[in-house]
Image: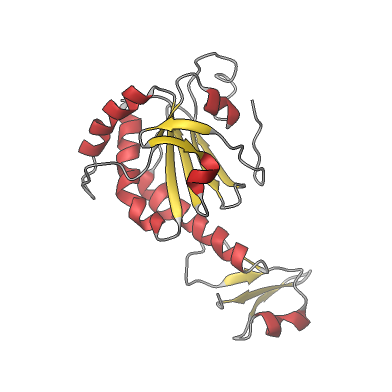
């Protein structure tokens, strides 16, 4: 089993999905991917999660993000399950899911992508955790979240707010590597200037200005809204 850590390259794989065969790297193209796993098809928790994620997909598409679902069942089961999922898409009714579901009946990909907790990792057909990975266009793992099998995600708080916010932060700090986002940051708020950026470079990097928010015992907290 692969032990994935933030910054690792997600291994490439080929898989059968509800939208045909895919190769992860080719399918991803130059986009960000939110990959999320589910322990089993047809369960109430998983069905409700996938329907809410389908409702929220348009907001993520604007940020160059694709969704990729994963569940440890067969392709025929996934295709039958889609009908239940679509019936729960009340906010944005649709005739098809806007993302593929990966079939992984033998748990090959779940093992490759480190989706098991300690109790299930040695079981041949163990259940996966509810894993969520954010993968950047360079195939690097940038964020990971693991919910226990018995705990459903909070799609209203986590998916349409926190995960969206994290992707916005990652994209911003990739574009401007001299900054980082503070607690509770959202788009439009001030960002922190990294402490290792020299004072004499500030005016060159941030021509519209910076602010000193707080003078600490060791250094200062500097911010800017230029991004």
Residue at x-position 50% and y-position 71%:
189
Residue at x-position 50% and y-position 47%:
28
Compared with 45, 106 (above or below) is above
- Pinpoint residue 139: horizontal percent, then vertical percent: 59, 47
- Is residue 181 something that shows in the picture? no
Compared with 149, 95 (above or below) is below
Residue at x-position 57% and y-position 58%:
170
Q: In screen coordinates, is 32 left or right of 201?
A: left
Q: How is the image coloured?
A: secondary structure
- Pinpoint residue 150: horizontal percent, then vertical percent: 42, 27
- Pinpoint residue 135: horizontal percent, then vertical percent: 55, 47
Residue 43, by quadrant, is top left
Residue 194, by quadrant, is bottom right
Which of the image's four quarters has the N terminus?
top right
Q: In screen coordinates, is 186 left or right of 96?
A: right
Compared with 99, 126 (above or below) is above
**5 and 12: which is toward the camera:** 12
Which of the image's four quarters has the C terminus?
bottom right
Q: As drawn, which residue projects farthest toward the top?
A: 124
Q: In screen coordinates, is 210 left or right of 89?
A: right
Residue at x-position 52% and y-position 45%:
26
Compared with 53, 46 (above or below) is above
């Amino acid at each position: 089993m692969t032990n994935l850590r933030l910054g690792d390259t997600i291994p490439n794989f080929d898989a059968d999905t509800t939208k045909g065969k895919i190769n992860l790297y080719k399918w991803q193209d130059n986009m960000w991917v939110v990959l999320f796993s589910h322990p089993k098809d047809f369960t109430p928790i998983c069905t409700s999660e996938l329907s809410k994620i389908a409702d929220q997909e348009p907001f993520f598409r604007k940020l160059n993000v694709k969704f990729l679902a994963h569940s440890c069942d067969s392709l025929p089961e996934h295709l039958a399950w889609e009908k239940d999922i679509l019936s729960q898409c009340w906010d944005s009714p649709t005739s098809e899911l806007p993302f593929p579901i990966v079939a992984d009946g033998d748990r090959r990909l779940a093992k490759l992508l480190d989706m098991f907790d300690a109790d299930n990792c040695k079981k041949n057909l163990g259940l996966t955790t509810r894993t969520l990975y954010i993968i950047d266009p360079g195939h690097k793992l940038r964020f990971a979240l693991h919910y226990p099998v018995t705990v459903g995600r909070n799609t209203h708080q986590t998916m349409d707010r926190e995960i969206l916010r994290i992707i916005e932060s990652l994209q911003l700090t990739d574009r401007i590597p001299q900054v980082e986002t503070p607690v509770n940051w959202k788009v439009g708020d001030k960002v922190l200037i990294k402490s290792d950026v020299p004072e004499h470079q500030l005016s060159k990097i941030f021509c519209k200005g910076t602010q000193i928010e707080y003078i600490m015992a060791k250094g200062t907290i500097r911010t800017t809204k230029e991004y």
